[in-house]
Amino acid sequence: MSVTAYKRTISHTEAPRQIERRILAQVTSELESQYQAFDSAERRLDRLQILADGLRHTLVKNQMVWSTFKMDLTEAENGLTPELKATLISIAIWVESHTQGVLAGGKLVRPLIDINRSIIDGLSGRSFETAAE
């Protein structure tokens, strides 16, 4: 099946929120399976090795998801409120900046997972209070 046909099929079977939630959940799951060794590594050299062993690819994938969200949020056709758009764009910018810090070996991965999980909960229709329970 071609990519165009696949996108068309998905768009007919899933709402945009469901697609966004599924994609974000997938990359978050990948981050969750890799972050502990990185976040607990004491030496920068060890962190850089973990990045080279595959975490870098997952971080870049997460960053691409957020870049796509940011681009979509700037489109005139995006139906979200201006306040929500601004908040989500700010989060996307933070994800970009934090990811660069992780890739340099100086920041932790866990905050990226926490942000993603909060957004996944929002896309699922659960409020932040409900998600924390």
Image (spheres, grey):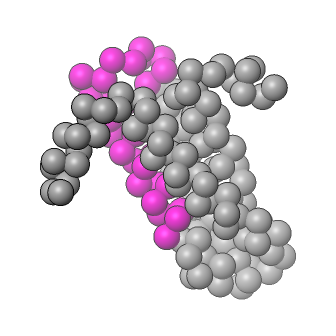
Between 86 and 130, the residue placed more toward the observer is 130
Residue found 47% across the figure and 63% down from its top: 60
- Please state, as top left, top right, bottom left or bottom right, where the C terminus lies in the image: top right
What stretch of residues is rendered in magenta? 57-85
The quadrant in which residue 55 appears is: bottom right
The quadrant in which residue 52 appears is: bottom right
Residue 39 x %, y %: 77, 66
The quadrant in which residue 127 appears is: top right
- Please state, as top left, top right, bottom left or bottom right, where the N terminus lies in the image: bottom left
Residue 72 x %, y %: 32, 35
Q: Residue furthest top?
A: 81
Residue found 22% across the figure and 48% down from its top: 6
Residue 121 x %, y %: 61, 30
Residue 32 x %, y %: 67, 58
Between 13 and 111, the residue placed more toward the observer is 13
Q: Is residue 61 above or below residue 105?
A: above
Residue found 75% across the figure and 20% down from its top: 129
